[in-house]
Structures are given as structure tokens and as C-alpha cells.
Amino acid sequence: MYHSVIPDGQNGHYHITKVGDFEFVRPLEKLMELFIPSRIRFLKAAIDVEAKTGVGAGIPEETWMKVLLREAMEAWEEKKKEYMTTKSPQALWDVLAAGSKKDQVKALRGLALSWDEFFAFVCQAGENLGFTYSSYRAHLDHKGLDRTKLPRLIRLHKNNAVESVGPTTLTPGQLKQVITARKVINAKFLDKGDEWHCFFYTEKSIAGKENYQGEQPHIHYISSKWGIPRADIIAAIQSGNYKATPVHIDLIKRHQDEEDED
């Protein structure tokens, strides 16, 4: 995991977190590894603001960090409890037990869920059934883009105004094209021996922009029972040459813990 702080030029900062690919981990352990540093950064940012106003000024940073770590650990215990007690749709459990591709497609037909339900499913499948968790991410820019010309950060606001931080030779229109043409593909795997289940999506589809008709944000699904090697699925996703599957799991809401990257 990589974290950077980028000044916005107006006495503020952007916090950018990038989580790299990982494979075959225990879900709860990995989510804890991601949650606690993020929580500490959030709490520390609030304290830094208070310190500038005189609240808590002069208190050693080591003392603050001990307090922040304790509070982050307590917050994680609450989050872990939520993961392990949230009830996920029965269809997700049915698909793990299904004996064929046909049964899996049938089990997931018409399914809609939230990210909270999905990650609860991942954690419970790990803790109760012994599945490991893997995640892969492919960042695909439009053809011909020279990334050396990009600023440190690009942000496209809801009013289509473009904000950038850092030097660049690109025009606002070109920077907007970088964002609108960018495609980010995420794949989440559950593995147990030779058995695997893959849930993948594009960030544009999550935003409801996978096509011009504003299609319902959704996740695709494929598994080891579909006759395609796991390595081929990963290669197709990372190259952007994947094929959509007949399974569309509708997302009820967008996950708030995933951070956008520019």
C-alpha cells in the first residue's frame, strides 16, 4: 500500500492511497492491514487541524500516535464485528456450493447487493470456509498518452471543471480526456485449492457510466467451473481484453472505502 500527500496550493492537501495487487491472503487480516493505517491518517489529519488552532498544541507526536493507534484498533474491532455479522444474500453462498456453471448463473440471476454485504461475504467465506482473498487492478489509459506529461493529480468535478496539481503541458481539455477515457478494472478472487471465484468490475461501471445509457452499476462473475484458467482471466483483465459474462450483479450503492486514483 502506497500513500502520498499532495498540497493543493491553497493551504490544503489531497491524501492519495494506492493499494497494490495481493494474492491468497486471509481476508480479515488484509482488511485490517488496510483499515488501521487509513483510520490513523484520518484521525491525525483532524488533530493537525486542531493543533493549528491551538487545541492540543505542544503535545508530543509520540503521545498522539499511541492514542490514535488505540482508537484505530477499537474502530477496527467494530468493523470486524460488522463484517462477521452482516448477513449477505443467500445467492452468494449458493454459488460457492453450486456444482456447475449453469447452477452458478442460475443462483446469481437477479442478485443485487451492497459492497458492505459483499465484503462481509468475503470475510465470512475466509473465516468459516477457508477461502483466501486476492485482488488485482488494471489501470488502462487511452492510446498514445505520455504519462510523463501528467501532473501529480487530476480531478474532474461534477460540473466538468478540471483541477490539476503539479506542472503539465496538457490543456484542460486534454486533462479531461485523460479522466474520461481512463478505464480501471478491479478483480476480487476467492480461492480454495483449485476452486476459485472471481468478481470483477470497471470503475466506470461502478459510477454508472459503463455505456451512454447509464447502465445500472454492476459486477461480473466467473469461476473455475467455467473452463477458463485462472491465469488467463487475470491476463485478460490486466490487458483490458476481458469479455463480459452473462452474470451481472447489480450494486445497490457505491462502496465508500474505495478511493479513486488519478
Image (cartoon, helix red, strand yellow):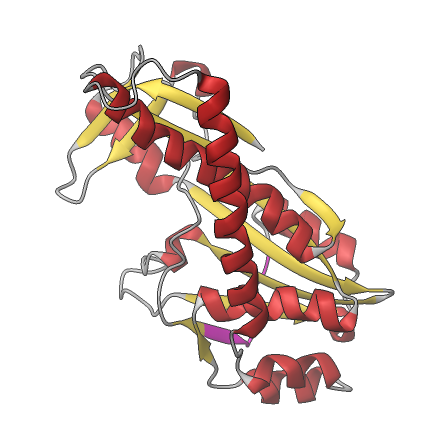
Furthest residue in direction left, as rendered: 159
123 lies left or right of 249: right
Q: Please check the rendered image and state whether residue 243 is part of the magenta-colored stretch, yes or no.
A: yes
Residue 244 shows in this picture: no
In the rendering, at what x and y percent does residue 38 appear?
Answer: 47, 38
Image: magenta residue range: 242-249
Closer-to-camera residue (81/130) = 81
Quick one: quadrant of the N terminus? top right
**Residue depicted at x 46% and y 85%:** 110
Image coordinates for residue 112, horizontal then vertical, percent: 44, 78
Residue 35 location (% of width, % of height): 53, 45
Q: Is residue 3 magenta?
A: no
Comparing 171 with 29, the one in front is 29
Nearest to the observer: residue 198 or residue 125 = 125
Q: How many marks?
A: 0
| Rendered location of residue 58, percent (x, y) | 34, 13
Where, by quadrant of the figure, is residue 181 drawn? top left
**Residue 79 visible:** yes
* Residue drawn 56% across the image and 47% down it: 240
Q: Quadrant of the C terminus?
A: top left
Query: Taking 161 as reference, is 260 left or right?
Result: right
Between 257 and 190, the one nearer to me in the picture: 257
Label the magenta part by its dominant secondary structure: loop
Q: Which residue lies most toward the right here?
A: 193
State the residue at coordinates (65%, 48%). Answer: 30
On screen, residue 52 above or below 28: above
- 35 up-or-down from 92: above or below: above
Relative to 204, is 108 on the left or the right? right
